Image (cartoon, grey):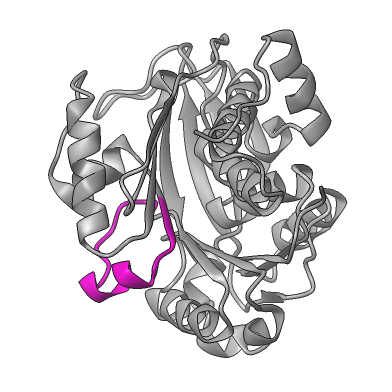
Amino acid sequence: MFPIGKIVVVGSINMDFVYYVRNHPLPGETISSDKAELKSGGKGANQAVAAALAGGNVTLFGAVGNDPFGRDIVDGLGQYGVNTEKIVRKETTTGTAFITVNDAGENTIVIGEGANGRLSVEDLADLPGLLDPASVLLLQNEIPWSCAEYAIEAARKQGGKVYLNPAPAASVPKDIFPQIDVLVLNETEVEFFTGIRFDDDFSRVHQAADHLLQAGVKEVVVTLGDKGSFYMNRQGKVIYTSACRVNAVDTTAAGDTFIGTFIVERQRLSPLKECLLRAGAASAIAVSRAGAQESIPRADEVALFMKQLNIERQPED
């Protein structure tokens, strides 16, 4: 079954400066990188690419600068199958991210918002016309919150589902949670919003998800890195999936890959556990490769990977 409805992403678009190092630098320390690369990134763009490669019908609203980076990024997004017609160009620099990746595949990221911080509600004027009850709106925390609020209100009026990935972790109005259908976040973001730290106590994952559901969110998905994922909804349904074991090269865009894939599988009306497993498999492939968007797998690659690992279709519980 093919995806039903549009996926509209409103989010950031960056040029990533990636430095591969043996160890992350300490405060005041200057180190040399083994390799340095320029890569297209930004959470909004990454998630749009992930959804497009998974088979989704994706339109991205965002902003780039008037520099060569902006032109190149937009061209690249189009080649991945993302509709880029709603990306605007601002009289400033394109957003940037400075990323260090160590030998364990772990990363640190510093973001310069650039054009992302200039995105305005006026730039989203065409958004309501793309939303309907079959559509999905996907947001993150790398654009002005006024734009996110406008987009959420538009989706609620048109009947589309709202997915929020509150990354990087930043305060959001408490009254926004009841307007979120699916909240997707990692352990760091869960701790920020709930004050609950997991460590190795998975009963706390359940506690944290319940806290967010009590705040008004309808469904919560917690990505747990190499420990898998956790799902819980307001009806009390709980699903835990383990992670696929791979050699981690670079964790950049792992969460973005999970989210984009998960949304497309939900639109295909796949059983919920299968949606989580497929999203986890896509994320595992992404961490086994260097880079952000170029690490994100196509749907056929994910299917082959799952077959090789003997991960079979999962019936709904």
User: Residue, x 17% and y 32% (percent of image)?
Assistant: 204
Camera-nearest residue between 174 and 108: 174
Q: Is residue 175 magenta-colored?
A: yes
Residue 19: x percent and y percent? 54, 28
The residue at the far right in this view is: 79
Residue 191 quadrant: top left
User: Residue, x 39% and y 15% (percent of image)?
Assistant: 23
Q: How many marks?
A: 0
Residue 270: x percent and y percent? 66, 42
Residue 197 quadrant: top left
Residue 98: x percent and y percent? 49, 41
Camera-nearest residue between 82 and 8: 8
> Is residue 106 rendered to the left or right of residue 198?
right
> Is residue 286 rendered to the left or right of residue 147?
right
Camera-nearest residue between 22 and 294: 294
Whether residue 255 is situated above or below residue 242 in the rendered picture: below
Q: Is residue 225 magenta-colored?
A: no
Whether residue 205 is situated above or below residue 41 in the rendered picture: above
User: Residue, x 57% and y 51% (percent of image)?
Assistant: 42
User: Residue, x 62% and y 79% (percent of image)?
Assistant: 91
Q: Which residues are magenta?
A: 167-183
> Is residue 245 rendered to the left or right of residue 269?
left
Res. 303 visible in picture: yes
Whether residue 9 is situated above or below residue 295 in the rendered picture: below
Whether residue 215 is situated above or below residue 155 in the rendered picture: above
Residue 10: x percent and y percent? 57, 68
Res. 10 visible in picture: no
> Is residue 190 rendered to the left or right of residue 70?
left
